[in-house]
């Protein structure tokens, strides 16, 4: 099996090392793991591509590359340049430092990398590690992903739904913020919504008198609705959410046609 790996935390991120180990185990002794990751952190870039300027790519070692671009850029660079169009059997993105549940999905470069792979017709999974008070007590905050990542990926490959539609199905996986032995299992979930949790800005004045704005986030441990990702994560489950890049509000189409047509 040939697996292409990327992330949004950067080529030196500890979560990437975790994912490379997961990929190596899944690919098997005769398989190939190719890493193409951002040269520097790209958190929050979502599905951005560097459409208006070029990016540099550098080989760091055997099957290991850094690109000055987003996770989606790295998937494109990995597929078309590094692999020269040789189709990967699977693209893995992560393991992200922090959750990509609920509204975080819309900002996530980790999810953006998996989404780009799906748009290229490639099977893809985004993986993220929810952080919280209990992960701070662990010697390695990625312990749940380390303990359960291989089994989750293998289960999805063997039993998951994989299609070849125009907006191909891909998966968003979040490991819960609990020690590995306390993980209760896997749950298939919808994307949740944290009420009253919004990004905002906080102004600061520099020593030179100029105003700068820092982006601020909201609480990450508010429960979402039952059956959704963050709710399952906070209950100790690995959430598995099937996704597509199609943003159409299909539930509103008929009503809108009645009003406008």
Image: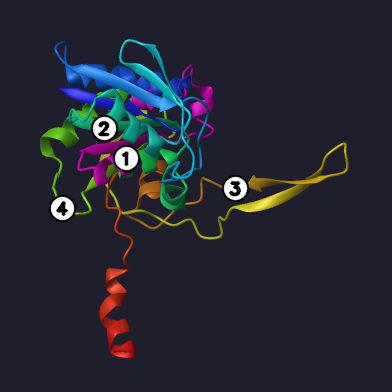
Residue 254 location (% of width, % of height): 25, 81
Q: Find the distance from the CA under tag 4 to the CA under tag 2.
A: 17 Å
Mark nearest the camera among 3 and 4 is 4
* 4 or 2: tag closer to the N-terminus: 2
Dividing the picture into quadrants, the one containing residue 7 is top left
In the depicted structure, whether residue 130 falls above or below residue 39: below
Label 3's element?
Answer: loop
Q: Is residue 181 left or right of residue 177?
A: left
Residue 102 location (% of width, % of height): 42, 51
Q: Is residue 239 visible?
A: no
Residue 169 location (% of width, % of height): 21, 48
Circle 4 Cα neighbour tier, 10 Å, few/some/many (<14 / 14–19 / ≥20): few
To which residue does mark 2 refer?
Answer: 91
Q: Quadrant of the C terminus?
A: bottom left
Closer to us: 146 or 84: 84
To which residue does mark 3 refer?
Answer: 217
Query: Residue at position x 46%, y 31% from top?
Result: 55
Q: Give yes or no for contact between labels 1 and 2 (Cβ–Cβ under 8 Å).
A: yes
Label 1's element?
Answer: helix
């Amino acid at each position: 099996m040939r697996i292409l790996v990327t992330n949004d935390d950067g080529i030196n991120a500890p979560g990437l090392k975790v994912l490379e180990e997961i990929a190596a185990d899944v690919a098997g002794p005769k398989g190939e793991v190719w890493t193409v990751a951002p040269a520097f952190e790209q958190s929050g870039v979502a599905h951005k591509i560097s459409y208006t300027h070029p990016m540099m790519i550098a080989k760091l070692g055997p099957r290991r590359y850094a690109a000055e671009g987003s996770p989606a850029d790295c998937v494109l660079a990995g597929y078309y340049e590094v692999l020269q169009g040789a189709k990967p059997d699977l693209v893995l993105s992560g393991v992200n430092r922090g959750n990509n549940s609920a509204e975080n999905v819309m900002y996530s470069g980790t999810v953006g990398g998996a989404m780009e792979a799906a748009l290229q017709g490639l099977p893809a999974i985004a993986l993220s590690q929810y952080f919280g008070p209990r992960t701070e007590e662990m010697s390695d905050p990625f312990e749940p992903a380390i303990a359960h990542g291989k089994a989750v990926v293998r289960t999805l490959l063997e039993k998951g739904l994989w299609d070849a539609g125009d907006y191909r199905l891909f998966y968003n996986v979040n490991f819960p913020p609990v020690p590995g032995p306390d993980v209760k299992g896997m749950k298939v979930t919808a994307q949740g919504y944290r009420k009253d949790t919004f990004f905002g800005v906080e102004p600061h004045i520099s020593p030179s008198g100029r105003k700068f704005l820092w982006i601020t986030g909201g609480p990450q441990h508010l429960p979402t609705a039952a059956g959704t990702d963050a709710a399952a994560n906070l209950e100790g489950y690995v959430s598995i959410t099937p996704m597509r890049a199609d943003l159409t509000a299909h539930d509103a189409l008929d009503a809108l046609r009645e009003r406008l047509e």
